[in-house]
Amino acid sequence: MRLSKAWTVASKDFKTYTKKKSILYSLFYFEVVVSIGLPFIIRFIASKPGSVVALPNLIDAFSFLFVIGAALAPVGIAAYSLVGEKVQKSLEPLLATPTTDEEILAGKSIAAFLPAIFINFMGALIFTVLVDLFTYNTLNSLYYPNWEIAIILFLLAPMACLLSVGYNVLVSSRVSDVRTAQQLGTLILLPLGAVYVLSEVNVLTLNTSSMLIMAAVLVVIDAVMFYLVKATFQREEILTKWK
Amino acid sequence: MGMIEVKNLTKKFGDVTAVDGLTFNVAEGEVFGLLGPNGAGKTTTIRMLCCLISSTSGEAQIAGYSIGNDADSLAIRKMIGLVADNVGLYEELTAYENLDYYGKLYECPEGERKERIEYFLKMLDLWEERDQPVSDFSKGMKQKVAIARALIHDPRLLVMDEPTANLDPEASRVVREFILKLKKEGKTILLNTHNLDEAQRICDRIGILKTKLLTVNTPDELEKSVWGTKSVIQVESISPRILTAVMELKPKDLRVEENRIILTLADPQAENPDFVQAIVSAGGRIQFVTQLNPGLEETYLKVIEETK
């Protein structure tokens, strides 16, 4: 696989998405709510007497939303990636170029992964700064940085983002319209949402070790997803069965 | 060795045979037209030759590279420029950006890419609109960009699938003239069309396809092979004496319509003077002599009709 080819595909997609506002906005809305809205809830709770005990658990639970955010942010782009080419009828000329399946898929994945993970990092930066600002007086120390947020941002979020990108590119290569691709694409959030709910009801504890195990599981699932995406990308089927 | 060599190429989709035992060759620099009704297998044939879909059986080579061979398919795709039946441009991008993207995918060096984009956009009268999104373009302008996209890497073989379909007559003419210009430059072109006038004007040879390849020939030879060579001699008035004189020369076929004698001849150039002489000797006054030319459309329809 030639990375320069994949980058050419990705660069074109970046250019396209900057001109498609609906896709561009889909990157931001969740991150804005989580990174700016939730610290104000934390601020409200921190101002209540006795909140010092409950505050760390709440902040940890909220910070897990950056894993969900990393999976949600690329949905719009990745779901559009191949079905968008189909809708514009540009897939046949693209497949006629001397570009391999791997290069096309890698380009589409890069185009969805990089902006999503960048926005997620920016959101997390704002979130951690605001949380420290709002909780310093209550906790008498800076809550961030800590190991949990490092694992979330540098392991879990990229892995979840990759999983979402892979799954959505897979969906995008199998359906015929953008709306269906996006609706099916958001299903990837269900297992991550379940982890969040289980942590909220204290069935699952989100600590360093449990998150490392989660990251290891995600690595395996990502590898399987990568194989599935490659195996199911059939040029002939895409060209002859898509109506 | 020809640019395209196809032997017994067959494509089945499940139980349906889309292309059945296709055999033809296209020489370098030749413009070859594939004619056929909708569903005849023209697009399927093009897709197989461009390595977009696999064949069920048979073989085909493009400039010596085999289409069924994975290692060869990248080389084949690199030497082909495809104008698909849908223009398939990126509507949000400008004409320049569309061409630049494909130039990169076809691995054109940057300097050459820029030169070629400028050359084609100027040649197709789109240079002033180069920075406008393609979504603002008319169908004809989009088709021009699609043709420029197929030529951006200077392909050895240009494959065009219905390049003037859905275009108004003026835009069709511009595209057709551009194809003729490419033909003059010696570009090898495989043209899928059901525009018979276009095929007659552009193609060196045509193949009529209806799942099977029914016939391959030059447009003129195809007409001759289907209709024979007919001469029409219009006489002021036809008398029994004139008809007797004509029949004595034993034409392959003779038909009289009003004051016209229609003759089927093996070699009109050699035989026409004898018939003219005979008619004049029999007292006939000839108004004109001409070749009967039913046209490619009639020929095509007759060939297709014979398969029913």
Image: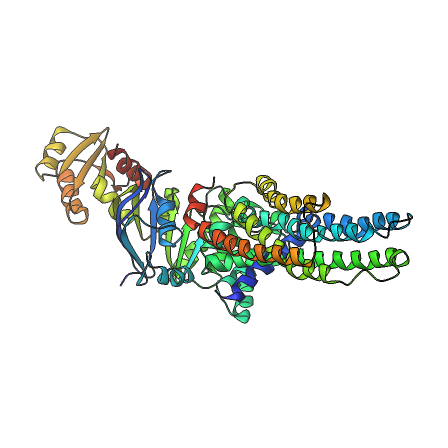
Residue drawn 13% across the image and 39% down it: B252
- Residue B129 makes an appearance in the image: no
The quarter of the displayed image where residue B74 is located: bottom left
The quarter of the displayed image where residue A122 is located: bottom right
- Residue A224 makes an appearance in the image: yes
Residue extending furthest left? B248
- Image position of B151 with respect to B85: above or below: below
Q: Is residue B242 left or right of residue A41?
A: left
Q: Give how far across and how far down residue B114 sits, in percent.
A: 56, 67
Q: Give how far across and how far down residue A61 sits, in percent.
A: 74, 50
Q: Give how far across and how far down residue B30 sits, in percent.
A: 33, 57
Q: Give how far across and how far down residue A4 sits, in percent.
A: 54, 66
Query: Could you tell me which quadrant the N terminus of chain B lies in?
Result: bottom left
Query: Could you tell me which quadrant the C terminus of chain B lies in?
Result: top left
Seen from the viewer's position, the closer of residues B195 and A173 is A173
Seen from the viewer's position, the closer of residues B44 and B257 is B44
The quarter of the displayed image where residue B214 is located: top left
Q: Is residue A236 left or right of residue B238?
A: right
Render colour scheme: rainbow
- Image position of B247 with respect to A44: above or below: above
Seen from the viewer's position, the closer of residues A57 and B119 is A57
Residue drawn 73% across the image and 45% down it: A200
- Image position of B303 with respect to B201: above or below: above
